[in-house]
Image (cartoon, rainbow, N blue to C red):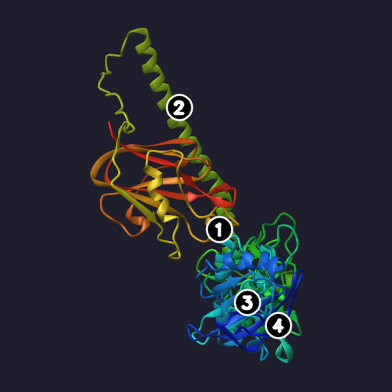
């Protein structure tokens, strides 16, 4: 019989209730650990009271989540709206989830913050799972420390999928709260956030409500967390800066070289000496964690080797590639006031020989430039006048006796390929080398060359950005012609104009994008002719989509008909 307390079918035997009751606008959800008698496995089963129509919206969300397959989200095994009679088998509304064993994030953080590497790994995997749900139009909800579980195999999982309600912005904010908690810890072991600067900023942007500051999507957050970890200023650099201080004030050069070497004041009209610029060894960028809310980045200033602060950007450590928040490249010193300049850059007297060389450079360079301009003007004048005289004689019907007509006409450039008849397509398949293994409407590929413009292949719907949600650089379809042919171009029909594409070709199969050479590119209209600059011998033609356009459910691209034309 079904449990008299939950109204579940005989298949599920509740073992114990886990977690507090979840109050919702339509009722209360209780979560139980239960045994699946048929498959002999533990499951998490959540029961909505009352059952019937009140639970309809929640069950609909659960059925959408049932199509997901990502280790970061608990799988949905079963769901039922129920009849509303809690005493009859199947009378309750319930959702059966995968049971996830492990330590909850709340338990882990009670002892203090997590290491940087673990923070990046846990939040990236969780964000990737939530982004997958957003791709199918499901806002997950329920992203709390108690529901996030660290699996024993090193993965992370979210219990109670989906929550009774959720929004896309709410998921972004909740992930920001989780990231902030990972940097500070919770409970008695909590302390102020002192983690890497990019993580601190990412948590702040995810929770921000200011226009233009909030993170655009969960997919963008996952992409930023996947960036190479960055490191702060080295201890050696900090120690070296500390050695040059005295009571919190930077020493002036004469403080170390003796009272006899005071700075020399220049007489009016005297050129100042040029100090030698030597790199300040070990001086690195300041930590963003100490920069407060006024984010700045150091850029070259007017003094040699000095820098100035520009509001609105971020000062922090750098990696070997472009950083998501514009952090400063390591090794470029940043100084906030006059007392903070390195001693090598402070004004100090120069010897007469250095000053003489400086004046020679200042005077000599303009004279040299002037001489180059005069020589260039003389050459242009003589050449142009000579050509003009020759042309004038030719117009009058006479040619100087010393001249001969030997100049051959300039060779014309290559003519664009002339498109001929369409080439038969033997087969086609999706080309997605940067994808995550999920299908990209693979079954609909034949619709792109079936001769019917009313049918089409399309990419998946992406959210947050027309650059495939910042998840990958593109996706395409490879068309196999069966044999090598000489081609002149491709004609593409699209019911949704605006996507950008490249036409790439290859004579042999290729697994990477570099295996196909670019032959043409353009933006899709209703009908787009992509003509090659010159005929190309190829068997495989790749229509590579590089940018999406705004569709009814997100950013996408649609291809109704592709005609590959032979060279005429």
Which residue corresponds to mark 3?
160
Q: Position of residue 490 (x, y in %)?
A: 37, 39
Name the N-terminal-most of marks 2 and 1. 2
Q: Secondary structure at mark 1?
A: helix
Which image quarter: residue 263?
A: bottom right
Name the N-terminal-most of marks 1 and 3. 3
Lateral position of residue 515 relative to residue 144, left or right: left
Name the N-terminal-most of marks 2 and 3. 3
Instruction: Work out whether residue 283 can be spotted.
Output: no
Tag of residue 245: 4
Task: Work out whether residue 86 or residue 212 is closer to the camera in this orientation and state it.
Answer: 86
Local crowd size for mark 1, using a 10 Å CA cut-off: few (<14), some (14–19), many (≥20):
many
How far apart in space, not on screen, are marks 2 and 3 (Cα)?
83 Å
Instruction: Work out whether residue 466 can be spotted.
Output: yes
Relative height, residue 112 to residue 499 (above, below): below
Lateral position of residue 286 relative to residue 133, left or right: right
């Amino acid at each position: 019989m079904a449990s008299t307390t939950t109204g579940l079918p005989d298949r599920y035997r509740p073992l114990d209730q886990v977690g507090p009751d979840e109050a919702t606008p339509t009722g209360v959800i209780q979560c139980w650990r239960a045994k699946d008698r048929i498959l002999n496995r533990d499951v998490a089963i959540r029961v909505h009271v009352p059952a019937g129509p009140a639970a309809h919206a929640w069950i609909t969300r659960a059925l959408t989540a049932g199509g997901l397959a990502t280790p970061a989200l608990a799988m949905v095994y079963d769901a039922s709206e129920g009849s509303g009679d809690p005493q009859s088998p199947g009378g309750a509304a319930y959702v059966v989830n995968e049971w996830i064993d492990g330590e909850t994030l709340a338990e882990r953080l009670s002892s203090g913050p997590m290491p940087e590497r673990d923070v990046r790994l846990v939040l990236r995997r969780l964000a990737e799972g939530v982004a997958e749900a957003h791709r199918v139009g499901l806002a997950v909800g329920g992203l709390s420390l108690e529901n996030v579980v660290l699996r024993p195999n090193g993965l992370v999982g979210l219990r109670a999928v989906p929550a009774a309600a959720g929004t896309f912005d709410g998921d972004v904010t909740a992930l920001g709260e989780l990231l902030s908690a990972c940097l500070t810890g919770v409970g008695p072991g909590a302390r102020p956030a002192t983690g890497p600067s990019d993580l601190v900023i990412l948590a702040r942007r995810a929770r921000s409500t200011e226009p233009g500051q909030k993170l655009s999507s969960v997919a963008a957050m996952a992409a930023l967390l996947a960036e190479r970890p960055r490191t702060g200023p080295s201890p050696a650099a900090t120690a070296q800066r500390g050695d040059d201080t005295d009571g919190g004030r930077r020493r002036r050069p004469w403080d170390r070289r003796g009272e006899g070497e005071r700075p020399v004041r220049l007489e009016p009209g005297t050129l100042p000496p040029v100090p030698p610029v030597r790199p300040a060894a070990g001086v690195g960028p300041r930590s963003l964690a100490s920069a407060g809310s006024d984010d700045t980045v150091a850029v070259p200033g007017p003094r040699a080797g000095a820098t100035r602060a520009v509001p609105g950007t971020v000062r922090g450590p750098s990696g070997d590639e472009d950083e998501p928040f514009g952090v400063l490249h390591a090794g470029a010193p940043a100084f906030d006031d006059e007392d903070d300049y390195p001693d090598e850059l402070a004004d100090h007297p120069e010897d007469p020989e250095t000053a003489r060389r400086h004046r020679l450079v200042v005077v000599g360079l303009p004279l040299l430039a002037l001489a180059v301009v005069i020589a260039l003007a003389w050459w242009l004048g003589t050449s142009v006048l000579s050509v003009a005289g020759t042309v004038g004689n030719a117009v009058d019907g006479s040619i100087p006796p010393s001249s001969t007509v030997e100049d051959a006409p300039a060779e014309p450039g290559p003519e664009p390929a002339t498109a001929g008849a369409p080439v038969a397509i033997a087969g086609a398949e999706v080309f997605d080398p940067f994808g995550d293994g999920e299908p990209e409407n693979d079954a609909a590929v034949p619709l792109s060359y079936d001769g019917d413009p009313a049918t089409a292949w399309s990419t998946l719907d992406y959210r947050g950005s027309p650059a495939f949600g910042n998840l990958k650089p593109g996706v395409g379809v490879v068309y196999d012609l069966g044999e090598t042919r000489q081609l002149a171009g491709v004609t593409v029909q699209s019911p949704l104009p605006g996507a950008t594409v490249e036409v790439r070709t290859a004579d042999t199969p290729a697994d990477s994008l570099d295996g196909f050479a670019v032959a043409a590119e353009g933006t899709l209209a209703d009908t787009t002719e992509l003509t090659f600059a010159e005929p190309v011998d190829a068997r495989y033609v790749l229509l590579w989509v590089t940018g999406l356009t705004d569709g009814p459910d997100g950013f996408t691209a649609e291809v109704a008909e592709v005609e590959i034309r032979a060279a005429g």
